[in-house]
Image (cartoon, rainbow, N blue to C red):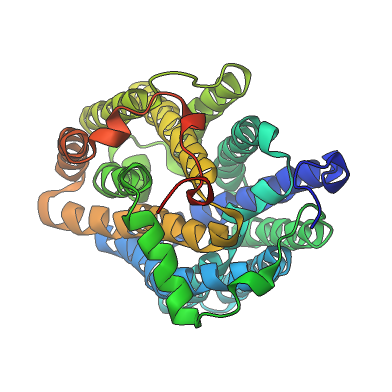
Amino acid sequence: MTDINSPALYRDRDFRFFISSRFLSTVAMQVQSVAIGWQIYDIERTPLSLGLVGLCEFIPMFLLTLPAGEIADRFDQRRVLALAQAMLGICSALFLTFSLLYPRNALPFYAVLVLFGAARGFSGPSGQSLLAFLVPPERLAKSIALSSSAFTVAVIAGPALGGFLYALGPVATYSISFVGFMAAAGLTTTFGGRRFDRASIAGASRLERVIEGIRFVRDRPIVLGAISLDLFAVLLGGAVALLPIFARDILHVGPVGLGLLRSAPAVGAALTAFTLSRWPIERRSGSRMFAAVAIFGVATVVFGLSHNFYLSLAALFVTGASDMVSVNVRQSLINFATPDPMRGRVGAVSMLFIGASNELGEFESGITAAWFGTVPAVIIGGLGTLSVVAIWMWLFPPLRTVDRLTDVEPISRKPA
């Protein structure tokens, strides 16, 4: 078997193409999300309609992400990811078609969102597990930070671009998304990098392999604590789904302002990611992650209370910056703790939690806003995030006391 540290396995071009592919697909997704949120709220004018956007994506992601992780371990992640990105592009084409044929009917859009969620269910685990095969182990932590930087730059550019494009109409918006997803799929097919012997996992059934991935996460308090902290903190504290209401009815800034609001967290995240790529977290990793999530909760409360556009932008900036610290620690912990044959399945569990925190969080935000009002829903969510931090620090002391990220080793190096 080829030495995994052999320089011949890794090409700088593959990492650049990985960054480019992720950037393009993320820009496309963010552009499209601004259009979908504004378009559906413009049709329905209810907070619940925005919550249903998240629910339509969450259900297929919930059902398919774990099986997709097993598929990513059994087959080549590159092919799985490329096919999923192409399907995301097809969904953009369908959104464009329905915008022309049924501009005042939200039902066709909800139907395509289900298909879009299914494609994301397959793209998440394969994309999550792929980076460790494209860079040498000693460059993994810095590569994660650089990848996060590219991702957050895309999340900055995407919503702002989506807001400006939607001012021209949905045709331009969904056309750009289609091109972005298809270009990302094309780049993904060119990846090289390291591969492992998949015959080593051929003995067990698919269900057994899926369960093995769940058990791997369950039996490691550091990994389980990091993933579940993100799940419940963002599930309660996320305000992104309600931004169209803030833009239209509270801050009165229109679709361009909505794009800027969507971009503000990513600006904070990008600056933090660039900082972490230059000065990575080396000590007290666990306690710093908990502190960052607490700051996220406080900033969410400030955003909910604000009626000033610039204060709202600043609060969202802080949520993005603090969340990036948590993301960087969590992804590093997972990558350092997971052996190669498990990366797809563990990545699937991680993506399932992340998908739940984002998409199910959007549904939760829509429901609570319908019950209590938009502003109280955001404030309650921020306070809930602070409660989660306190409870998780008590439930997962090994996570709280993690010092160096590199101290967490794969199961193959330590007894089960």
Q: Quadrant of residue 187?
A: bottom right
Position of 22 relative to 46 (above/below): above
**Residue 391 shows in this picture:** yes
Which is nearer the eye, 376 or 340?
340
Position of 69 relative to 239 (above/below): below
Going 56% across and 70% down the picture, which residue do you hit? 119
How many labels were placed on the picture?
A: 0
Q: Quadrant of residue 378?
A: top left
Report the side of 413 relative to 388 (left or right): right
Percent x, y for residue 44? 33, 66
- Residue at the front extreme of this rendering: 415
Which is nearer the eye, 274 or 369?
274
Percent x, y for residue 49? 31, 64
Percent x, y for residue 331? 49, 41
- Residue at the right extreme of this rendering: 8
Q: Quadrant of the C terminus?
A: bottom left
Going 67% across and 74% down the picture, which residue do you hit? 199
Position of 88 relative to 10 (above/below): below
- Residue at the bottom extreme of this rendering: 205
Report the side of 378 relative to 349 (left or right): left
Report the side of 280 relative to 383 (left or right): right
Going 52% across and 28% down the picture, which residue do you hit? 267
Percent x, y for residue 204? 51, 80
Q: Quadrant of the N terminus?
A: bottom right
**Residue 168 shows in this picture:** no
Report the side of 280 relative to 350 (left or right): right
Position of 213 relative to 167 (above/below): below
Which is nearer the eye, 346 or 179?
346
